């Protein structure tokens, strides 16, 4: 943290020592970058207005973001401004750059304010950065007039004041009222208080489902064994090799081992399946999938 502070101070000192550009010099540098992609001109323009970026970044420290990160985001906004600036419009670069610097910092703050992503529409941005200030002013004015505002009335007034939908105000109010907590935090101050993570629903198979599945599997296995026992030894061997192995054998390989043609093996397999289907009729439909 101390190292970051030192970096911030060094960057701020360098920015404060940078040259101040007059309108004519600024215009020449802007033309050189736009028309000739002169990187030296771009560097000089960026360096001259880095103090502006740092000044704007400092205004957002209250949101808890590291100053060094805020300055970096401000620098990104400044470079975007330089890349998109049109000197023919007759506007000073500093005036144009303010919007890009502010937008870049605001996007960063909203992305990192919470682990849960906050929306970045213009309505949500306006609420995020102005809602608490407007709310405090409305509450002060109501107190002076001897009025007491409930939460819904206050939200309606904020909606009208900022010019955003009431639904957005309600959503942002809930977001700003909460904060991120560790799932390993205890639910009470007691030594034996359980952690919040213990209250989450288990996505795994529940005990009742596991027992039910095991029962059904055992029943299916019993039915299949009964059907297999009704086959001849050769038929049982073919079914085992064709259906019960991870790497099922081909009709040709079984024919070579048993001294039979591939077609004969196919006929014996079909006959075995017919016997098993008759034996399994009336049982669970799931077991017949084994023979498909």
Image (cartoon, rainbow, N blue to C red):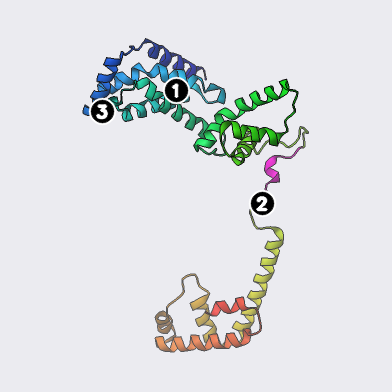
Asked if the stretch drawn in magenta spans residue 155, the answer is no
Indicate the secondary structure of the residue bearing disc 1.
helix
User: Is residue 103 at least partly visible in the picture?
Assistant: yes
The part of the chain drawn in magenta is 193-201
Label 2 close to label 3 by CB (< 8 Å): no
| Residue assigned mark 3 | 34
Q: Nearer the viewer, residue 155 or 14?
A: 155
How many other residues sit within 10 Å of disc 3, few (<14), some (14-19) or many (≥20)? Answer: some
The quadrant in which residue 127 appears is: top right
Is the residue 181 above or below the residue 273 in the image?
above
| Residue assigned mark 1 | 71
| Residue assigned mark 2 | 202
Indicate the secondary structure of the residue bearing disc 3.
helix
Q: Earlier in the sequence, mark 3 or mark 1?
A: 3
Q: Position of residue 98 (x, y in %)?
A: 42, 23
In front: label 2 or label 3: 3
């Amino acid at each position: 943290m101390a190292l970051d502070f030192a970096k911030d101070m060094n960057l701020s000192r360098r920015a404060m020592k940078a040259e101040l550009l007059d309108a004519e010099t600024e215009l020449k540098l802007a033309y050189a970058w736009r028309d000739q992609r002169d990187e030296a001109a771009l560097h000089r323009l960026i360096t001259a207005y880095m103090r502006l970026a740092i000044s704007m970044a400092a205004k957002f420290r209250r949101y808890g973001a590291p100053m060094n990160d805020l300055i970096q985001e401000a620098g990104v906004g400044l470079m975007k401004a330089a890349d998109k600036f049109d000197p023919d419009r007759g506007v000073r670069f500093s005036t144009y750059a303010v919007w890009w610097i502010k937008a870049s910092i605001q996007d960063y703050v909203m992305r990192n304010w919470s682990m849960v992503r906050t929306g970045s529409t213009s309505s949500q941005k306006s609420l995020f950065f102005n809602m608490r200030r407007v709310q405090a002013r409305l509450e002060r004015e109501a107190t002076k007039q001897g009025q007491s505002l409930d939460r819904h009335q206050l939200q309606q007034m904020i909606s009208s004041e900022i010019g955003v939908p009431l639904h957005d105000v309600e959503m942002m109010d809930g977001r700003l009222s909460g904060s991120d907590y560790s799932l390993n935090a205890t639910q009470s101050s007691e030594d034996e208080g359980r952690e919040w993570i213990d209250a989450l629903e288990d996505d795994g198979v529940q005990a009742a489902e596991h027992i039910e599945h095991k029962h059904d599997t055992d029943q299916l296995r019993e039915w299949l064994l009964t059907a297999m026992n009704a086959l001849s030894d050769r038929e049982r061997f073919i079914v085992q090799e064709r259906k019960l192995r991870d790497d099922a054998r081909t009709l040709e390989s079984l024919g070579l081992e048993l001294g039979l043609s591939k077609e004969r093996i196919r006929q014996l397999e079909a006959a075995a399946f017919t016997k098993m289907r008759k034996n399994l009729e009336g049982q669970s439909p799931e077991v017949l999938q084994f023979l498909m």
